Amino acid sequence: MREVEPTRIKQMRIFILSNLNRVYPTPLQVRTLFRVLTGFDELYDKSLLAKDLTYLKQKGYIEHVDDQIGGSLTFEDKFIGLTADGKEIADRTQTDPALEI
């Protein structure tokens, strides 16, 4: 895994929220989101995606929609969506200093 600078991490997390906001309220499959992110940064890998999604879930900005319906899918097959807090961050009606660049 490559070393990633903090600004780049923040950019990708904001990009994740922005892409989920584009399809809101519909969830997005992790596999599809990964393809979009690698189009933005071809060196972005699945381990970074897992870390970013875990961080955003812990902050309460995203949720695994599969968990709500009892799905037990692989990581790439899971569906994620914005929470109400995540929507506010993506719309920039609220700010999070940890995601400010």
Image (tube, rainbow, N blue to C red):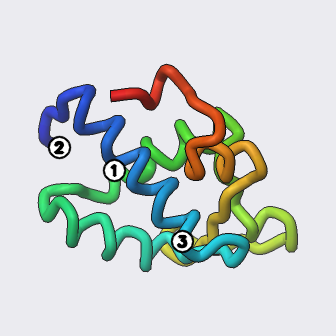
Going by the image, does 98 lie left or right of 24? left
Question: Is 89 located above or below residue 67 in the figure?
Answer: above
**Labelled pair 1, 2 in contact (Cβ < 8 Å):** yes
Disc nearer the start of the sequence (1/2): 2
Q: Quadrant of the N terminus?
A: top left
Q: CA distance from mark 3 to mark 1?
A: 24 Å
Residue drawn where x is 49% and y is 70% of the image: 30
Locate residue 39, reporting x and y percent. 21, 72
Question: Is 82 located above or below residue 48 in the figure?
Answer: below
Q: Which residue is mark 1?
A: 47
Badge 1: residue crowd in 10 Å (few <14, some 14–19, many ≥20): few
Name the mark nearer the viewer: 2 or 3.
3
What label does residue 1 carry, if any? 2
Q: Quadrant of residue 82?
A: bottom right
Q: Which residue is mark 3?
A: 22
Q: Amino acid at mark 3?
A: Arg
Name the mark nearer the viewer: 3 or 1.
3
Q: Amino acid at mark 1?
A: Ser
Q: Amino acid at mark 2?
A: Met
Q: CA distance from mark 2 to mark 3?
A: 29 Å
Disc nearer the start of the sequence (3/1): 3
Determine the secondary structure under disc 1: helix
Residue drawn where x is 43% and y is 42% of the image: 51
